[in-house]
Image: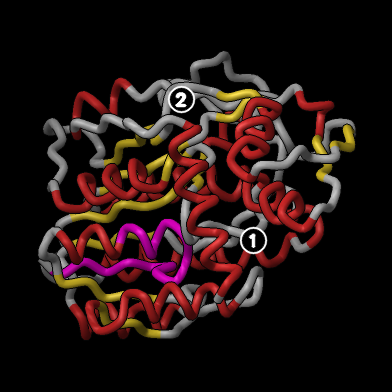
Amino acid sequence: MKILITGIAGFIGFHTARRLVADGHDVVGIDNVNAYYSVDLKRARLAELGDSVTVHEIDIADHKAVHDLMQAEMPSVVVHLAAQPGVRYSIEQPFDYASANLIGHLALLEACRHAKGLSHMVYASSSSVYGETSNPPFSEYEAANEPVSLYAATKRCDELMSSSYAHLYGIRQIGLRFFTVYGSWGRPDMAYWKFTEQMVKGEPIHIFNHGEMRRDMTHISDVAAGVAAAASTPPTFRAGVRPHRIYNVGNSRPERLLDMVETLETLIGQPATKIFEGMQPGDVEETYADIRRFKADYGYDPKTKMKDGLGEFVDWYVDWRRR
């Protein structure tokens, strides 16, 4: 099966591509390799993929380029993971989110609308859409209509656009709300990476909300397995129901931020100098996924415990620094 992955140089895109290639699929990728974080890291991911994938360096907001590529490649499935991530950065650079997350998502929907032989599209959403009004564990059946950051608002808009295109044009779609994904080849703007880097350098770490944060830490191996399952399994929908469904992709085991720090201290072998600060704009105190729906429909079963997942990351990070 030919599968097109957008954001293939990104953290989740890279691991998903490796998983799908290992499963025997023909993978084509799109990425503009922007400088939101280390371009060298993104290039290294692509180098790691090597000749197992074909990569096109285009911006998903360029709707003509996306349309032309879809017409040329004619994939059976689109896995749309490209986006501008980051809650706090969305406060500093809001228009980047409008371009990548809104215009880019619309470009993929339009390209899918005119594609031939397309089975379905799987796309990335975020646990951020739940905001502060949801009661944990977060369920896909909640309204999720009060986001607390622009990033969250753009991802909720993506879900609504996908729902409308499913209704208007019958494009079958699966939206995946990711919960705090971590692991090797990860993103340097994430807390677990920042803490590891600062602790290795002997620098103090800044802990927000005085450490009273809980995150549903989900290892990348479990996430990639879930995305691959959604991509390789054509979804079915009852007659008369718009062909669009949303799933949580989490670990269903929220962890205290201080527990994560203590685990890193043990793995790295040195204590952290901690600076406690207040809550940051756009953040929420807790994320916690109800994953029963994804488990029932796709057999999703995350197995990685935080200690093991962070151990895998720290080993990779030490090797990455040597490079």
Taking the image as shown, residue 152 lies to the left or right of residue 74, namely right
**The residue positioned farthest toward the top in the image shown:** 135
Read off the residue under disc 1: 97
Query: How far across and down, in percent of the image, does residue 201 sit?
Result: 77, 58
Query: How far across and down, in percent of the image, does residue 195 sit?
Result: 71, 47
Q: Nearer the viewer, residue 167 or 124?
A: 124
Read off the residue under disc 2: 289
Question: Which quarter of the rendering shows the C terminus?
Answer: bottom right
Circle 1: element type:
helix
Checking the image for residue 45, the label placed there is none
Q: Nearer the viewer, residue 200 or 302?
A: 200
Q: Nearer the viewer, residue 190 or 124?
A: 190
Q: Specify start and end residues of the magenta stretch as a single range.
A: 2-16
Taking the image as shown, residue 181 lies to the left or right of residue 150, namely left
Q: Within 10 Å of the Cα at label 2, are there few (<14), some (14-19), or many (20+) other Cα atoms?
A: many
Q: Within 10 Å of the Cα at label 1, are there few (<14), some (14-19), or many (20+) other Cα atoms?
A: many
Query: How far across and down, in percent of the image, does residue 108 sit?
Result: 38, 66
Taking the image as shown, residue 219 lies to the left or right of residue 87, namely left
Taking the image as shown, residue 155 lies to the left or right of residue 18, namely right
Name the image quarter holding residue 260.
top right
Q: Is residue 6 magenta?
A: yes
Can the viewer see residue 317 in this picture? yes
What colour scheme has been applied to the protein in the rendered image? secondary structure
Q: Residue at x 42, y 59 (%)?
A: 81
Amino acid type, callout 1: Tyr
